[in-house]
Amino acid sequence: MTGPARGSDGRPPRWAKDAAKYLLPGEDAVLATRRHWAVLLEPAAKALPVLVAGLWVLTLDPDNRVGATVGLVLVLGALGSFALRAGEWWMRHFIVTRRRVLLTSGIVARTVTLLPLRRITDLTWKETLLGQVLGYGTFRFESAGQQQALSQITFLPRADLLYHQVSGLLFGSDWGSAAGGDDEGNPEPAEGREGGRGGRRDTQPIPGARSPRQDGPAPA
């Protein structure tokens, strides 16, 4: 989950550094996590055959410069491809505040995708059989009938706990529900709220309207 604010060496963890870069003043991260390590199973499965083939070519005829070069290229390509995917996994963080959902990604060029909590109308949590065994799941966000860039996040660890925490932010008053406020999640001013100071209540009489007790025949 979010982890400690300081690591064992006294420095803030990676997710805290990412959160500090992209959060608004006064906005704190409620939870932050990387995706589950199972996301690396597919690139590992793709890189392993290429790595084995490269090692086989290298050992088949070490004195053959062409074969050695081909084998070396295969080995370096397999290792480099997997290292790139591992680096993307390490740098990608799923961050949730009381205002927004953010997903940071990228190694050289950093990308931040965000979705205000108040725009989320539905949250779906899905776990496959493998996900139940390894402990990861998928979140799908529905937002006012619009297709959002942050509509689906796969391989989230401990998705059941994340689901309850995010649901609490969306719908639980004890968590400070995201209902109300502007598109960035900022609270509405008191003057604009129903029943707020300076605002009109629904039960307030309409100016100029006659009270039911005053209805009756007009005086002669």
Image (cartoon, rainbow, N blue to C red):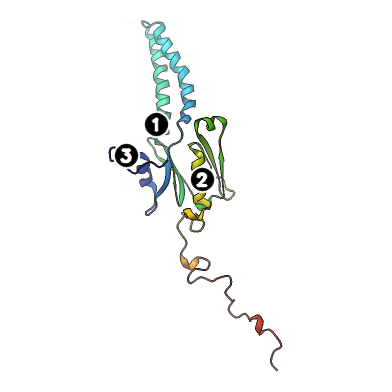
- Please, what secondary structure does the residue beneath circle 1 have? helix
- Residue 145 position in % (x across, y down): 59, 49
The N terminus - image quarter: top left
Q: Which residue lies furthest to the bottom in this view?
A: 220
Amino acid type, residue under disc 3 in the picture: Gly
Q: Which amino acid does label 1 sit on?
A: Gly
Mark toward the start of the polypeptide (2 vs 1): 1
**Residue at (54%, 29%) from the top-left corner?**
130
Contact? badges 2 and 3 (CB < 8 Å): no
Q: What element carries label 3?
A: loop
Which residue position holds label 2?
Answer: 164
Residue 146, image x, y percentages: 57, 48
Q: Is residue 24 left or right of residue 130?
A: left
The residue wearing badge 1 is 87
Front residue of 75/10: it is 10
Is residue 70 depicted above or below 43 in this figure? above
Q: In this view, does 50 lie to the left or right of 210?
A: left
| Comes first in the chain, label 1 or label 3 | 3
Residue bearing mark 3: 7
Pointer 2 local density, CA inside 10 Å: few below 14, some 14–19, many at least 20: few
The one of 68 and 47 positioned closer to us in this rendering:
47
